[in-house]
């Protein structure tokens, strides 16, 4: 059951099994979910009018990776304020250089992801 008026979460990951699993998890908790296989596809969705309350972004992807996506997102005033949660298998501070709102490590703590999604969905609902 999707909560009416709640903006979608955009999942960006090149691994289809991970995308589908996370989408299913979020959908079962009431979220509408849009997915993209890389940063290029995610930017295309944003430019097509998808307005997510949160972007969950993998870093290591082909074509347009998470770093490149975030750089382009921040350069566009229409998309720059969309919160981004970076998730990566790399446990270093390099991921934080892209000014993410949160950082999750793989394997992902699913409860933490749901807490973050809820916080941003609630914040968007009040603005």
Image (tube, rainbow, N blue to C red):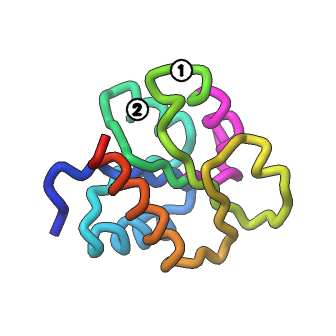
Would you name the residue on which mark 2 appears? 46
Give neighbour class at mark 2: few <14, some 14-19, many 20+ (Cα, 10 Å): some
Task: Report if residue 10 lies within the magenta region.
Answer: no
User: Where 87 sits versus 123, above or below?
Assistant: below
Task: Report if residue 61 lies within the magenta region.
Answer: yes
Give neighbour class at mark 1: few <14, some 14-19, many 20+ (Cα, 10 Å): few
Q: Quadrant of residue 109?
A: bottom right
Q: Secondary structure at mark 2?
A: helix
Residue under the point 82% across and 66% down? 91
Would you name the residue on which mark 1 appears? 76
Residue 80 picture location, percent across and down: 53, 29
- Tag 1 near tag 2, CB within 8 Å: yes
Q: Which residues are magenta?
A: 57-72
Q: Secondary structure at mark 1?
A: loop
Q: Quadrant of residue 3?
A: bottom left
User: Where 71 sits versus 99, above or below?
Assistant: above
Q: Nearer the viewer, residue 76 or 65?
A: 76
């Amino acid at each position: 059951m999707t909560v009416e008026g709640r903006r979608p979460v955009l999942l960006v990951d090149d691994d289809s099994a991970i995308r589908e699993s996370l989408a299913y998890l979020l959908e079962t908790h009431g979220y509408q979910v849009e997915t993209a296989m890389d940063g290029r596809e995610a930017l295309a969705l944003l430019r097509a009018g998808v307005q997510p309350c949160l972007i969950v972004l993998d870093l290591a992807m082909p074509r347009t990776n998470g770093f490149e996506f975030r750089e382009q997102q921040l350069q566009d005033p229409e998309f720059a304020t969309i919160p981004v949660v970076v998730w990566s298998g790399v446990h270093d501070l390099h991921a934080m250089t892209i000014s993410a709102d949160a950082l999750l490590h793989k394997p992902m703590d699913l409860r933490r992801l749901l807490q973050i999604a809820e916080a941003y969905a609630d914040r968007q609902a009040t603005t």
